[in-house]
Image (cartoon, rainbow, N blue to C red):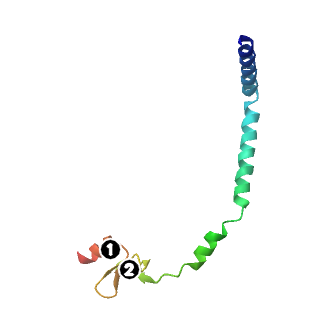
């Protein structure tokens, strides 16, 4: 059993010395591998489910803020009285003051 441990220890020391000696080449190899992995990920076609769901979403009506003139979707706009829309509570409070 001790012979096996000594052999493993010697292999670990040799491996560590090789890694120290060739650390720049190992780092360059890892960088090239990451670059190829990223390129492969970027070249994959996007999910067709996501593209179809984006195309099926209905267009939202936009309204113009009465204070700053920013166009905001009707679902996110704050409206006060009839047909007076604001993009945020800040714009609405500035008009009231």
Say which element carries label 2: loop
Residue 48, compared with residue 38, is above or below; it is below
| 65 with respect to 41 (left or right) | left
Q: Residue furthest front?
A: 1
Residue 76, compared with residue 22, is above or below; it is below
Q: Give how far across and how far down residue 71 sits, in percent.
A: 44, 79
Q: Give how far across and how far down residue 33 sits, in percent.
A: 74, 45
Q: At 35% from the left edge and 81% from the top edge, which residue is drawn?
A: 85
Q: Residue furthest bottom?
A: 82
**Classed neighbour count for the residue bearing mark 2: other residues with Cα under 10 Å, few (<14), some (14–19), many (≥20):** many
Q: At 32% from the left edge and 74% from the top edge, which residue is drawn?
A: 91
Q: At 34% from the left edge and 87% from the top edge, which residue is drawn?
A: 83
Quarter holding the N terminus is top right
* Residue 48 figure quarter: bottom right
Residue that badge 2 annotates = 65
Q: Give how far across and how far down residue 43 sits, in percent.
A: 73, 60
Quarter holding the C terminus is bottom left
Who comes first in sequence, dot 2 or dot 1? 2
Counting the numbered discs, the total is 2
Q: At 42% from the left edge and 83% from the top edge, which residue is drawn?
A: 63
Marks 1 and 2: in contact by CB < 8 Å? yes
**Classed neighbour count for the residue bearing mark 1: other residues with Cα under 10 Å, few (<14), some (14–19), many (≥20):** some
Which mark is drawn over residue 91?
1
| 94 with respect to 53 (left or right) | left
Q: Residue furthest top?
A: 2
* Residue 52 figure quarter: bottom right
| 19 with respect to 80 (left or right) | right
Say which element carries label 1: helix
Query: How much space separates mark 2 and mark 1, taking CA atoms?
Result: 8 Å
């Amino acid at each position: 059993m001790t012979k096996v441990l000594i052999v493993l220890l010697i292999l670990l020391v040799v491996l560590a010395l090789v890694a120290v000696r060739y650390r720049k080449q190992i780092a360059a190899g890892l960088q090239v591998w990451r670059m190829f992995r990223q390129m492969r990920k970027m070249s994959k076609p996007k999910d067709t489910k996501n593209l179809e769901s984006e195309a099926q979403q209905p267009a939202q009506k936009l309204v113009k803020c009465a204070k700053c003139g920013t166009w905001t979707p009707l679902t996110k706009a704050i409206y006060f009285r009839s047909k007076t829309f604001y993009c945020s509570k800040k714009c609405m409070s500035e008009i009231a003051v």
